[in-house]
Amino acid sequence: MSLHDPIEYEQASPEVRAIYDDIMATRKTDWVNNFWKVLAHHPENLQRIWNNIKQVMGHGALDPLTKELIYVAVSITNNCGYCIASHGAGARAKGMTEAQLAELLAVVGLANETNRLAIGYGVPVDEVFQSR
Amino acid sequence: MSLHDPIEYEQASPEVRAIYDDIMATRKTDWVNNFWKVLAHHPENLQRIWNNIKQVMGHGALDPLTKELIYVAVSITNNCGYCIASHGAGARAKGMTEAQLAELLAVVGLANETNRLAIGYGVPVDEVFQSR
Amino acid sequence: MSLHDPIEYEQASPEVRAIYDDIMATRKTDWVNNFWKVLAHHPENLQRIWNNIKQVMGHGALDPLTKELIYVAVSITNNCGYCIASHGAGARAKGMTEAQLAELLAVVGLANETNRLAIGYGVPVDEVFQSR
Amino acid sequence: MSLHDPIEYEQASPEVRAIYDDIMATRKTDWVNNFWKVLAHHPENLQRIWNNIKQVMGHGALDPLTKELIYVAVSITNNCGYCIASHGAGARAKGMTEAQLAELLAVVGLANETNRLAIGYGVPVDEVFQSR
Amino acid sequence: MSLHDPIEYEQASPEVRAIYDDIMATRKTDWVNNFWKVLAHHPENLQRIWNNIKQVMGHGALDPLTKELIYVAVSITNNCGYCIASHGAGARAKGMTEAQLAELLAVVGLANETNRLAIGYGVPVDEVFQSR
Amino acid sequence: MSLHDPIEYEQASPEVRAIYDDIMATRKTDWVNNFWKVLAHHPENLQRIWNNIKQVMGHGALDPLTKELIYVAVSITNNCGYCIASHGAGARAKGMTEAQLAELLAVVGLANETNRLAIGYGVPVDEVFQSR
């Protein structure tokens, strides 16, 4: 159930089309996924979020695949089905193998387990971790 | 506030000491962090969780640093202070730079934002993401 | 997938019908949504939760629309699809415009991002925020 | 425990000082809270997040106080202590009364309860909520 | 950091004292914990929440200890330090042993792990689980 | 949407069949649910997670039904639809009655509410809860 139908390129305003064009050019693809087509109902948010994604997810101290893996890990922890599907596909497009996906899932699952053990036991932070 | 005081090596049973020894040998360190010293109140859990960590976090299709980055990303999303401190230190020990940490935090923050936008808008999953 | 089928008015016990009647009278509508029809399998919970909603969501220091906006914000953060749909409709019924919804979503998304930045960086609370 | 010490104005680079100046000018205050002083270790993120906050939290279809209330509601749901303290203070500065805070907390608590009831019972979405 | 100082019995209004008296009488204790003393700043919420606790946590189809264990499990998953401390103490007062606590923590941790594996893999619900 | 199709017994490798056989023998059933059939795409994880479940969920200081109730409580709080369905069925198979389910849901909902009240008010932990 969606709050809004996606806005297709044909229906989009020139302002929104320009953002779609930038998304496709940046990603070297000829289509735009629904996330952007739904955000397009509020062009100001569409532009703002796309600017953030472009700035954060590009090449930097971390490579784009590692960033996608982190994105998928957060999306699984938050149970965002759309985000798991879209960033899972993004990670595959950037070279994630099935073996890497299986290890990613294992780490995400285990981290969620030990997070609760540390929280439940109220483990005191070791001095060496505090001294920075 | 901790449910149990950490069990130091000197106070530990031979069974627990053997696990501490394995932790230190595996990590090539001469100390054990509080997470394990608190779990030691239940040796069966201590052994089980340590076995899981050893199996999941070692070398594989993903390198150990990438796994630590994923661990930190999940721990931040779950707000586990101990886990952020311990795995943040672990990531640094495996070579994470300040620039990489800053980008990790940027990705984790942005993923948490777009997760809620996708959830709030109820964005329908694109067909191309469903066909596998 | 639902644990229980909704209990329709016709099938409901007099005790449950009385609560349905109160819901419809309070909301000035002629129907009851599924949340209540499912809770009706446990009349004690149905009565208790409805009493809470009536006491909390009515007019007070905050107007009913603001309360619905807060309800939607929490429901998005918790990824409760039913709650987003029902309270989103409730907010619209109380006058929420599309422009307000877009801003609500922007605030909810951004708050989820900065929450993780504050948690991940472990930002110390400013003295001025502590002195009360 | 913080990953980084806050960067005070005196120690800050001209680039960071300019952002601090904009924060103080925009908020009509003579100080900057720690969230920004910690983000300052990565000026690119500091600038990006501040730009987002300025764009999202200003006057619009929703008034600034309502936006702060939504921010606090999300921060409580995510258990972000720093965010509750800073945006709670922000809401008070924008006129939130103690009575309004008490009602905000009541709505946030109740929403978190009914979210889990809807999720646990797997309540099917009413047709009227789906037709948009 | 607390939004309000706890209201002690001596400072409390007759209305609030009556609720404190009911809490102590119901629990057969001679003191009231801070949760109620802070809620007392809003007597209406204090009365409402206490009524809910009395109705839900008493003897029923589930025994009070099992209910406390469930309460602790939810509080650990939500990372509520106060709730872990208070309901952990409540569970001990109702007979929880250290061995039971260790198993509770093991189940909570493992459930948080497998939850993410089921979510991450998008495991389809088995037909037998759907037919009800 | 699933990342992988479940692997049926007929298609499974001898290694995976052996685990399926152990699952069916341990549970005294003649079928395996999809969670395991999807994990089977990574036999190492399948074996590891099954070993954990066998060790944690069996008879101990807590009876198996109580453990299933805790599992369902966590799964509802995390909004894991598959886990609610599978462990809800597991709890029924171990004797959970509809009345017990209704009380479980009431406790889970109320705990999620009071968790946020304690977090939002920043209730200070009572000394008596700290001294252990």
Image (cartoon, coloured by chain):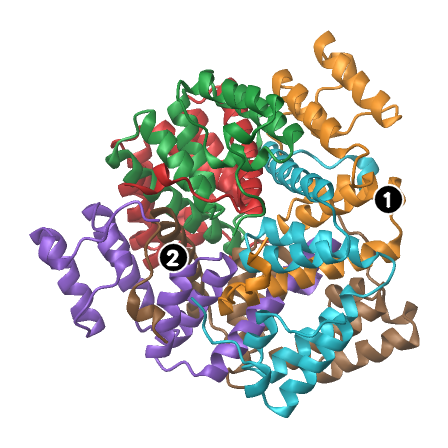
Chain colours: A red, B green, C brown, D purple, E cyan, F orange
Name the spot of residue F73 as percent of width and height, x first: 71, 50
Is residue C25 at least partly visible in the picture? yes
Identify which amino acid the numbered label 2 is placed on.
Answer: Leu
At 44% from the left and 57% from the top, the residue drawn is D80
Amino acid carrying label 1: it is Arg
Q: How far from the left and from the top, in percent, is residue F99?
A: 87, 58
The residue that mark 1 highlights is: F92
Q: How many marks?
A: 2
| Residue occupying the far left of the picture | D14
Which is more toward the observer, B56 or C98?
B56
Secondary structure category for the residue under label 2: helix
E83 to C46, vertically: above or below: above
Q: Chain of mark 1?
A: F
Q: From the viewer's perspective, is residue F104 above or below residue B19?
A: below
Residue appearing at x 59%, y 25% in the figure = B16
Q: Is residue B7 left or right of residue F90?
A: left
